[in-house]
Amino acid sequence: MNDDFMQIKSMQGELKISHKKRHFGLTVSTQELIYQKPHANFYIKLQDILSITPFEVPVGSRPMRLSASSSTASETVYMQEGMPHYRFYVKEAHVHNRSGIFHMGPSQFILPVHEDLLRAISKYGGMDAFE
């Protein structure tokens, strides 16, 4: 685990599953998904997730810079080979970083998500799969 990760100070709901890698971490409770990066934690309420769709990682991809069209913020995502990636569309999220806590409006995240985590998000978020 990366020493630059910030501790999760508070979490709504009961912790169900957590997955940590070198560049990111995902934690799922009965009410929230917390995406951890070095120096920042993104808090997403499960009820605020609008959709989760598979995302195909381009062959030979390198770190990608994604920008939200409604803000000047950008985020670097490290694509993890071998793990399925999903695009999360959310109504809102909160970012906790070393400067404070900030509200984010409608956003999208492309995240590598292990199958067990995806099942927990689906179960506690009340989501159904469409094929």
Image (cartoon, grey):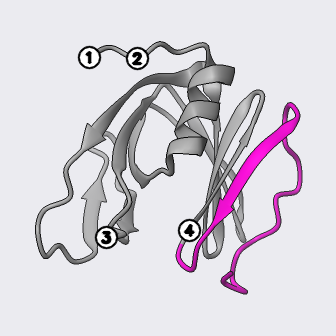
Residue 103 shows up from this direction: no
Q: CA distance from mark 3 to mark 1?
A: 24 Å
**Type of amino acid at the residue the image marks with label 1:** Glu
Q: Which residue is mark 1?
A: 131
**What residue lies at 13% left-to-right and 62% top-to-bottom?**
58
Q: Which residue is mark 2?
A: 129
Looking at marks 3 and 1 on the same chain, the residue that comes earlier in the sequence is marked by 3
Quadrant that contains the N terminus = bottom right
Structural crowding at the residue carrying mark 2, measured as other residues with C-alpha within 10 Å and reported as few (<14), some (14–19) or many (≥20): few
Disc 1 vs disc 4: Cβ atoms closer than 8 Å? no
Label 3: element kind = loop
Foreground of the two, 75 or 50: 50
Task: Determine the image quadrant of residue 88.
Answer: top left
Quadrant that contains the C terminus = top left
Q: CA distance from mark 2 to mark 1?
A: 7 Å
Disc 3 vs disc 1: Cβ atoms closer than 8 Å? no
**Type of amino acid at the residue the image marks with label 4:** Phe
* Above or below 77: residue 52: above
Q: Which residue is mark 4?
A: 24
**What residue lies at 28% left-to-right and 54% top-to-bottom?**
67
* Above or below 7: residue 96: above
Percent x, y for residue 30?
78, 28
Q: CA distance from mark 4 to mark 3?
A: 14 Å
Looking at marks 1 and 4 on the same chain, the residue that comes earlier in the sequence is marked by 4
Q: Which residues are magenta?
A: 1-23
Q: Which residue is mark 3?
A: 81
Disc 2 vs disc 1: Cβ atoms closer than 8 Å? yes
Task: Determine the image quadrant of residue 70.
Answer: top left
Taking the image as shown, residue 97 lies to the left or right of residue 67, namely right
The tag on residue 35 is none
* Above or below 60: residue 91: above
Label 4: element kind = loop
